[in-house]
Amino acid sequence: MNFTHLFAFYEVARAGSLSGGAQRLRVSQPAVSREVKELEERLGVLLFDRLPRGVALTHAGRLLFGYAERIFTLADAARSELREVAGLAAGHLKIGASATLGVYLVPKMIAEFTTLYPKVSIELTVTNTQGVAHGVANGDFTLGFVEGPYDEARLHARHIGSDEIVLAAAPDFRHHSRQLFARDLAAQMVILREPGSGTRAVVEGAYQRAGIEIIPSMSVSDTEAIKRMVVAQQAMAYVSSLSIGAEVARGELSTLEVADMRIERALHLVWLKGRSLSPCAQAFFELAHKHPAHAQGHSPVARDVTHLHGSARPFPPLNASNAGAFAADAAPGA
């Protein structure tokens, strides 16, 4: 069915005359009459009875008018809603975030965003990096925040900051040697996040590059649980510096220096290749890029590392495929 013909019929029916319909459409009366006649011929029914003064809908015309009214009412509603979305007066955004970012960073961004755009609803799912990357690739999330490697073939990424992975312990923790080295930690009680987490991948990558295998004494999927275990079990754990800032400030946790290793990682905002961002997704993207986390962050850089035997070996430069890799320095890490 030709919607130009249908709209002409609809306006004539609303006006009650061909001349009135022409005025509503801002075209000539002969043009409107032609549109209605062509519609009647295509449908094979008479839609109007032509009267001395105006027109009256036939039975077929009344049936068609009911459908036309619903069609154009929906069209107006769609147009109105799209205008609201374009102006960020409405909309819905699904975001996935890895555990560290989803708990310690993204909520601050969402709070700022909802202050600016209170009518846009946001659905945040917190999982590990692997789950976020998978969700974005499958279209479950429009935007994803990850702290580990991502699928470059399917995802675009924007660097939004950096994070240091630190060795956390209770303030009264005592280790046997005066100075800690990466190789010593591989044989001690060290807790790591679960496989699939960005933090775990970065730590294992750092040790692998140093030629050391680290086998955790325990794998835990929740950072808050790890912090409690560190205190209760007098253990050490590799965690994000973002996750323990408050505890360190209160004196509940401390960080231990590893003489020959410093681990940093890039934080990325990812989205599916080939998918255009909606107005609300684009607005959140821009906010995340301008967020203080981006301004304060810095890209990890390759450094020399002094190993236990005193030899220095440069590590390859970081790139998108190993964005979670580490930078090491003989000087004590923060």
Image: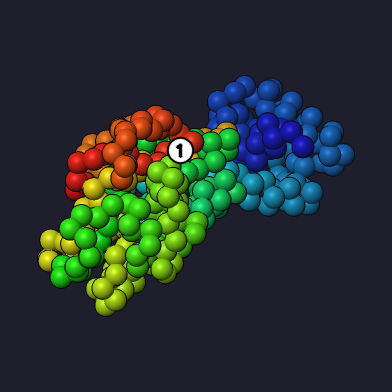
Residue 88 in sight = no
Residue 1 in the image, given as x and y percentages of width and height: 77, 37
Relative placement, left or right, of 29 versus 112 is right
In this rendering, is residue 238 above or below 33? Answer: below
Task: Locate residue 132, reporting x and y percent.
Answer: 49, 52
For badge 1, the amino acid type reads Asn
251 lies above or below 82: below
Which of these two is toward me, 136 or 113? 136
Residue 88 place in picture, x, y as percent: 38, 43
Q: Secondary structure at mark 1?
A: helix
Q: Is residue 57 left or right of residue 214?
A: right
Q: Which residue is mark 1?
A: 322
Q: What crowding class fits label 1: few (fewer than 14 Cα within 10 Å), some (14-19), or many (20 or more)?
A: some
Residue at the front extreme, as displayed: 309
Viewer-side residue, 211 vs 286: 211
Q: Is residue 213 visible from the viewing direction of this image?
A: yes
Residue at 68% x, 52% y: name it: 66
Q: Position of residue 12 (x, y in %)?
A: 64, 37
